[in-house]
Image (cartoon, grey):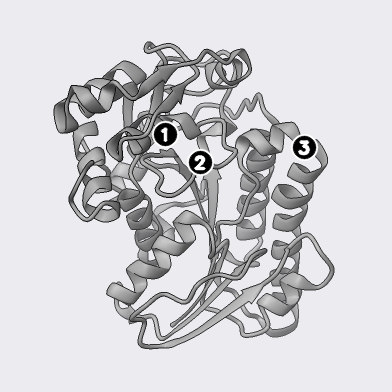
Amino acid sequence: MHLLVIGGAGMIGRKFAESLAANPVLGQNTVTRLTLADVVPPQEPAGFHGDVTCLTADLSEGQAAEKLLSSRPDIVYHLAAIVSGEAEADFEKGYRINLDGTRNLFEAIRAANTEEGWCPRVVYASSNAVYGGDFPDVIPDDYILTPQTSYGTQKAIGELLLADYSRRGIFQGIGLRLPTICVRPGKPNRAASGFFSGIIREPLVGLDALLPVADTVRHWMTSPRSAIQFLRHAATLDLALVGDRPNLTMPALSVTVGEQIEALRKVAGDWAVAHIRRDPDPTIARIVDGWARAFEARRALSLGFTTETRFEDIIRAHIEDELDGRIA
């Protein structure tokens, strides 16, 4: 089986490729060919025993999508995006990458489908940012999309396109509304949600982290481990069970910043919590205030998607996966 991962240089794309190197079996199939693409060169995952191709491409430019699809992969993972804070700060760039790039990809598949009958599975990484404004404390699966940011709007449009192209038989689509991923390894990115990871990641290695919002802020989070399992499960899920609503809210934990901090205290101690510095940022607070705080995610759970049940487990997973089981 051949997988194309667009956004393969990002954190999720990289970890997904590493998981395929460790275990290339997806359901009844084995991944024997892997193509990773991004605007910067992706790294080949160590230990993958099949064929790996690493490409640089920008879906918003020229014939980039057609070139990426020329090898006719069985599954296309569309993980590439400009993140929330950057999409809000740079309106034109956000729409060019997040909307035009997605449309270019879908149109390139449509052209190949028309000519050859090629109909791959498309796994689209969406976001809970498709919800916004006045919503209930716990959002049900059938709640309307009301994004209040450019990023959320771009993802919502992508979901509608995914559903329509799937309905017309152009490809077999499934959209995953990913929760905020925590704890994200590496350096902070420009996502408005980055501090949720920062207040855990930096203190664990003895560095200070800035907290721009109140301890009472509640958010929907899952670990990189769970996110990778979402992607793997999406490759094997019987899409007949999804029906004509191919976009699913992924399960996660609804926790407050204060609960995050107490979980950090439980796992690492007071010395780690002492590295959190409160630095209120009205812009970040305004953006986060418009985000959803909890979801039912019943459809995804009934279809076999799973996540952690305690935030301490998310912290421990980060320590195991990124810090070799040790903290400062």
Seen at 34% across and 19% down, the residue is 256
Amino acid residing under circle 3? Asp
Contact, CB < 8 Å: mark 1 with mark 2? yes
Q: Hey, which quadrant is residue 25 in on the image?
A: bottom left
Residue 92 to residue 56: above or below: above
Where is mark 3, residue-wise? 90
Residue 190 to residue 58: above or below: above
Q: Position of residue 303 (x, y in %)?
A: 32, 50
Q: Secondary structure at mark 1?
A: helix
Q: Hey, which quadrant is residue 215 in on the image?
A: top left
Q: Secondary structure at mark 2?
A: loop
- Assess disc 2: are there few (<14), some (14-19) or many (≥20) residues with their C-alpha within 10 Å of its C-alpha: some
- 318 vs 180, left or right, is left
- 296 vs 246, left or right, is left
Distance Cα–Cα, label 1 vs label 2: 7 Å
Any mark on residue 198, and which? 1
Amino acid residing under circle 1? Gly
Residue 159 to residue 14: above or below: above
Seen at 36% across and 81% down, the residue is 48
Residue 237 to residue 214: above or below: below
Give the quarter of the figure containing the N terminus: bottom left
Where is mark 2, residue-wise? 188
Seen at 78% across and 45% down, the residue is 93
- Assess disc 3: are there few (<14), some (14-19) or many (≥20) residues with their C-alpha within 10 Å of its C-alpha: few
Distance Cα–Cα, label 2 vs label 3: 18 Å
Q: Secondary structure at mark 3?
A: loop
- 42 vs 59, left or right, is left
